[in-house]
Amino acid sequence: MRAVVMGAGSWGTAVAKVLADAGNDVTIWARRPELVEQIASGHENPDYLPGITLPDDLRGETSMPAALDGAELVVCAVPSQSLRGNLEQWRDHLPADAILLSLAKGVEISTGKRMSEVIAEVTDFPARQIAVLSGPNLAKEVAQGQPAATVIACTDEQQAERVQAAFATGYFRPYTNTDVVGCEIGGAAKNVIALACGMASGMGFGENTLATIITRGLAETIRLGMALGADITTLAGLAGIGDLVATCSSPLSRNRTFGARLGEGATLVEAQEATNGQVAEGVKSCSSVRALARAHGVEMPLTEAVHQVCHEGMSVESMVSSLLGRSTKPEVYGTD
């Protein structure tokens, strides 16, 4: 398959490597000529995946029209809040029969739309040509060839199977799913919960606390997903609890690392400096996920608390106190 990965961050580069290892004709697009040269000639992305050797046949390209020319699979590997702006630049060059695959995990702040909805709105592509990839996939580990699994979700099962075949390698196992909503809600909410786990870790709390946050975070995610029509089994799988556990537990997770700095007392600016100048996706997503939950009458106390810390000046200590001070209730409250 002729595939182009639009974006050369850590996850975009790792996905390009997987596609190339799976035998596809792969181009990775980036704006900076020096980065393209390093990828194409040096076979490395030193800015985002230093020390990882990329396939010799993985090409780099700075020209957006040239990169998209003849593409059968277009992988959208840009952050969620910049996806719309990028798509507006790409849409006139997108091959009409291409499959558009979103890697972004978030909810658009200005509209409350999921990424597949943004893609459909900007490009006018039908749902059968729009897919999402989501799962417990830390970029560095995938790029190293460590065994991992993921989910390719598309409303058209045959299209999902085409993308599945393009990604299947000896170390990367893709599953298919037709529940796009569930996969996207799981991916967006887990970044917010990972921030909360990081904050707790930064304050010195142990595994009991982290397990509690992960479990209650999953409950929040299920409530929101079900309100939007997701299948609960999706959120019990790779794109739900699988992604949640990986992101909340690993020091390779930018969201968890960012939250840990906040828990240690750092400001948002100081935490950003600790993550190589990159803002964790959950810092923005907490606001849009919170707004989406409120619009559908869904209670998400952890998400509310993370938003208050990141955007309303609440201290991490106050956040913990507010969560512990909530009224007691049955565990299954609000999930049916």
Image: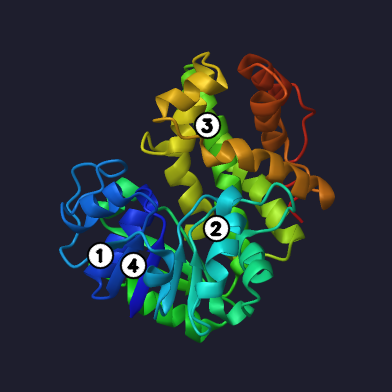
State which quadrant residue 190 falls in. top right
CB within 8 Å, label 4 to label 2: no
Residue 189 in view (yes/no): yes
Which residue type carries mark 3? Answer: Cys
Q: Nearer the viewer, residue 179 or 91?
A: 91
Question: What percent of the width, then of the height, locates residue 113?
Answer: 70, 58
Question: What percent of the width, then of the height, locates residue 142?
Answer: 30, 54
- Mark 4 vs mark 2, foreground winner is 2
CB within 8 Å, label 1 to label 3: no
Marks 3 and 4, Cα distance to the nearest angstrom? 27 Å
Query: Left or right: where does residue 128 sit relative to residue 108?
Result: left
Marks 1 and 2, Cα distance to the nearest angstrom? 21 Å
Q: Nearer the viewer, residue 296 or 67?
A: 67
State which quadrant residue 300 falls in. top right
N-terminal-most mark, 4 or 1:
1
Which residue in the protein does label 3 denote? 197
Which residue type carries mark 1? Answer: Arg
Which residue is found at the position 34% from the left and 78% from the top? Answer: 2
Above or below 287: residue 116: below
CB within 8 Å, label 1 to label 2: no
Residue 317's label in the rendered image is none
Secondary structure under tag 2 reads: helix
In the rendered picture of this protein, how many numbered marks are placed on residues?
4
Which residue in the protein does label 4 denote? 173
Residue 86's label in the rendered image is 2
Which residue in the protein does label 1 denote? 59
